Amino acid sequence: MAKNIPNPHDKYFSAVFSYPEIAEKFLRAFLPKKYLQLLNLSSLKRITGSFVDENLQEHFTDMLYQCNVQNSDETIWISLLLEHKSYHDPEIDFQLLDYINGAWQQNKKDGKKRQLTLPIVLYHGDKPWVRKPITAHFGETGKQFIDFLPKFEYILVDLSTFSEEKIHQMHLDTIILNMIMVLKFGRNKKFVINHINRIFYRANEYYNERTGENFFYVSFVYLLNIVEISSDNLTTIFSQLPKPLKSKAMTLYDSILKKGEQIGEKKGRQKWRQEGRQEGRQEGRQEGRQEGRQEGRQEGMQFTLEIIEMLKNNEEPEEIARKFNVDIEFVLKLKKEIG
C-alpha cells in the first residue's frame, strides 16, 4: 500500500479518540497527578466541533472533551491535540494561544461562560521536542517586561523520547500501550512487517470487547495506509497475530481489497483508454490495469478509515454509500464487522 494517503494520521487520531473510554485511559496515563486528583474523569464527555480554524489546520487536529471538577459544579475542557509536524515548531506557544482564544471567542458567541481549557499536545515526530518559555521569543526585553507577557502551560506527550522498553515500563492500559506503539513505530516498515505482534502486544486482552475490537480495526487499517505492504509482507504480518485477531484482520483486508480492486479495474480501463490506445500497445492496457488496481487498493484503504469513523458517528449507511460512490453492501459489511 502506498503512503500518499491524505491525512491518515488525522483520521486515526480522530477515530481512536472518538471513544471517551479510550480518551479517559489516555488521560489517566499522561495527566500529572495533581490534575488527576482535581478531575472526575468518569464524567468525561466528548464535545462535537473543533477550535482549529483554517490558520491552525496545518498544525493540529483536535478532539475536545468536557470534564467535571471534583466536588464542584464547575467543568473544564480538555483538548487533545495531535501535532502534525514531524519536528518541534517554535511557534507552538502562539498557536496554542490562538487555539484557546478561539475557544473563548466561541463561548462568547454562544452566550456561554468561558471554559478553562487544558491543552494536551501529542507529538509523534522523530526529533525531541524542545520546550522554551514564551519570554525566549522576545530576548532580554522579554525578561525585563515579563509582566506583560501571557503565561500558560500545556501538557506534552513527546513520543520521540519513548523507547519500546520505556513504553512497557510505563504500565499503560493495553489499548493505550498499543496506540502508542502504533504511532511510534507505524511509519517503520520493517518493524510493522516483522514485529506487528509487538505493536499489538497483549491485544487478546481487549479484542473481544466492542471498543477494543474497533480500536484494532482502525489501527490495522491505519498501518496499511501508511506502509507499503506486499502480499508476501501481509503473509508475514498475519502469521504473527493471535488466531482471533488474524481472522478479523484477514476478513477486513479481504473486504477492502475486493472493493479496491473494483475501483482499480475501473481506473485501469480508463487509464488504458487514455494512454494505452494512444500508444497502440498491448502493454498499455496491462500497465493501465496494473496501475489502476494499485490506485484502487490505495483508495480503498483511504475511504475505509473515513467510513468506519462515519459509522461510529451513527451516520446512515445509505448516505455513506452515496458519498463515497460505493456499494451499500460494502458499507453494511463494514458496519457489521465493527458492530
Image (cartoon, rainbow, N blue to C red):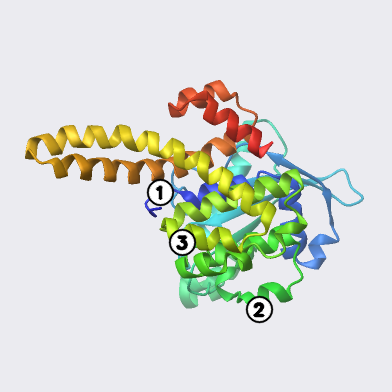
Label 2, secondary structure: give it.
helix
Residue in the image at 46% along x and 61% along y? 233
Label 1, secondary structure: give it.
loop
Query: Which residue is the extreme one toward the right?
Result: 71
Q: Earlier in the sequence, mark 3 or mark 2?
A: 2
> Looking at the rendering, in which quadrant would you find the C terminus?
top right
Residue in the image at 67% along x and 56% along y? 243
197 relative to 322, above or below = below
Tell me the tag on residue 233: 3
Q: Earlier in the sequence, mark 1 or mark 3?
A: 1
Residue in the image at 67% along x and 59% along y? 242
Q: Nearer the viewer, mark 3 or mark 2?
A: 3
Q: Nearer the viewer, residue 287 or 183?
A: 287
169 relative to 177, above or below = below
Q: Is residue 272 left or right of residue 12?
A: left
Tell me the tag on residue 199: none
Q: Which residue is mark 2?
A: 165
Label 3, secondary structure: give it.
helix
The three-letter code of the residue at mark 3 reads Asn
Alpha-carbon span between mark 3 and mark 2: 25 Å
Residue in the image at 45% along x and 28% along y? 326
Q: Which residue is mark 1?
A: 5
The three-letter code of the residue at mark 1 reads Ile
Residue 283, image x and y in percent? 15, 45
